[in-house]
């Protein structure tokens, strides 16, 4: 049995679909942070079979959680203070995402001009549909690398 110690202050991202933990690490840019980060891949789960878990020991307010709801809306965010769980929540889908996914429309300005941010807005929250801010191209999850 793998045992990763508890954190004193920070967040624990739980119920991540197996295999998406590293994508969350990458898109949240956790490698740029100076705090301890633990990634547990393929942990046993009664509800999911297996799951990933990410523990980040830092001030919870310094973390942008929008990207995790986009990558995996089923994630549970556990806020830890002084070694105790103080809040457990789900993060709603963000209304807008920047530089997480790319537009696949070959005529979109983002594929022609370099340096333009890839921005998508939430067009349909029920069906989790995002559209490009520039050309309105629909993004589908099948296009993602997670």
Image (cartoon, rainbow, N blue to C red):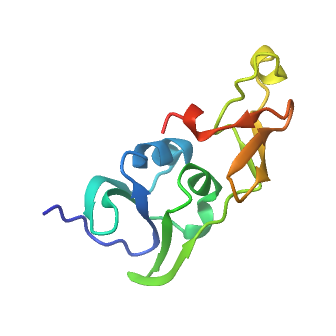
The extreme front residue here reads: 127
Is 28 placed above or below 7 here? above
| Tag count | 0
Q: x and y percent of residue 130 in the render?
A: 73, 44
Q: Is residue 57 shown above or below 131?
A: below
Q: What residue do we see at 44% from left, 57% from top? A: 35
Location of residue 109 (image quadrant): top right
Task: Where is residue 121? Give x, y as percent.
Answer: 79, 47
Up the image or down, 70 lies above or below 80; here it is above
Q: In which quarter of the image is the N terminus?
A: bottom left
Q: Position of residue 53 (x, y in %)?
A: 37, 59
Residue at the spot 34% in from the left edge and 62% down from the top edge: 48
**Lateral position of residue 120 relative to residue 44, left or right:** right
Relative side of 43 to 22, left or right: left
Residue 15 position in % (x across, y down) = 41, 63
In the rendered image, which quarter is residue 101 located in?
top right
* Residue shown at 24% from the left, 64% from the top: 4
Residue 144 appears in the rendering: yes
In this rendering, position of residue 101 left or right of residue 72: right
Residue 56 visible (yes or no): no
Residue lying at the far left of the rendered structure: 1
Q: Which residue is found at the position 65% from the left and 56% from the top?
A: 66
């Amino acid at each position: 049995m793998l045992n990763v110690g508890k954190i004193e202050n920070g967040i624990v991202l739980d119920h991540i679909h197996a295999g998406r933990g590293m994508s969350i690490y990458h898109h949240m840019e956790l490698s740029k942070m100076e705090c301890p980060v633990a990634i547990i891949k393929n942990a046993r789960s009664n509800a999911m079979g297996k799951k990933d878990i990410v523990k980040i020991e830092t001030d919870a307010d310094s973390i942008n959680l929008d990207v995790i709801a986009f990558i995996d809306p089923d994630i549970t965010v556990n806020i830890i203070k002084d070694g105790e769980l103080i809040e457990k929540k789900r993060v709603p889908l963000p209304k807008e995402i920047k530089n997480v996914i790319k537009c696949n429309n070959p005529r979109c300005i983002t594929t022609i001009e370099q340096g333009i941010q890839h921005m998508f807005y939430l067009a349909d929250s029920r069906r989790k549909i995002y559209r490009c801010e520039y050309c309105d191209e629909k993004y589908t999850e099948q296009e993602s690398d997670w």
